[in-house]
Amino acid sequence: MRDEFLVYIGCGLTDAPQEFIGQVGELKKTLDQVSHVRVLDFVGKGDTNSVEVRKRDLSQVASCDLMVAICEFGSTGLGMEMQKAVAENKHILACASTLDRSQLVRGIESDRFSFFQYEQMQNVVEQVEEWVEWQGRPEYDKENESYFRYLYRLAIANPKVYQKKRERIENMQDGPARYRALKHLSAVEEMLT
């Protein structure tokens, strides 16, 4: 696993209440304490030079490994940052306290994008921790190994991530891909017992 993942937290601040701004500040401090995570700074509310704000924030998005997009309040700036992250093929964890957020955001088609609902900022911390852990999984080398072998290596190297992978496979839509993946899971489970 890499020593450090750079995490950028984006959110709408212009119309956000002070309580939310304080929660985001605490979230950044908490995430900075997570193993293998360094939170990149963004130019906050009240900074006056718009050109510098845009340059710095978009530069931070370009530098990050993971963007956490808190879609709680409408924000053109957050939308610009997310589009930059998509264009740069960055991992994006988008979230809000309710799922009735912009269809444009929730419609992002990328295997590096996910949207989740949170009840408290601690849920965001947990998602980032899970993402970091997932980055430490063994890579699947399609050229040189079977999917079965990959799943088996994953189960041995990182059982917690293997369980998440197992849940994702079990929740796949019915079809040939799910059927094949379930066959591999069954064989791995048999070998592990």
Image: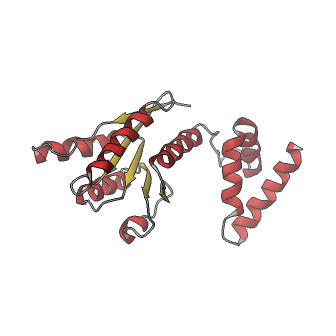
5 sits to left or right of 85: right
**In the depicted view, which residue is nearer to us: 40 or 120?**
120
The residue shown at (66%, 65%) is 172
The residue shown at (24%, 55%) is 77
**In the depicted view, which residue is nearer to us: 100 or 3?**
100
Question: Given the current orientation, which residue lies at the most extreme top position?
Answer: 3
- Counting from the top left corner in percent of width and height, residue 14 is at 21, 54
- Counting from the top left corner in percent of width and height, residue 161 is at 66, 44
24 sits to left or right of 53: right
Q: Quadrant of the N terminus?
A: top right
183 sits to left or right of 17: right
Residue 147 higher or lower than 52, as above or below: below
How many numbered discs sit on the rendered protein? 0
- Counting from the top left corner in percent of width and height, residue 86 is at 37, 55
The residue shown at (72%, 45%) is 150
- Counting from the top left corner in percent of width and height, residue 158 is at 69, 38
Q: Quadrant of the C terminus?
A: top right
Residue 141 higher or lower than 75, as above or below: above
The part of the image, by quadrant, that contains residue 47 is top left
The residue shown at (58%, 39%) is 133
Residue 31 higher or lower than 117, as above or below: above
- Colouring style: secondary structure
Question: Given the current orientation, which residue lies at the most extreme left position?
Answer: 49
**In the depicted view, which residue is nearer to us: 43 or 52?**
43
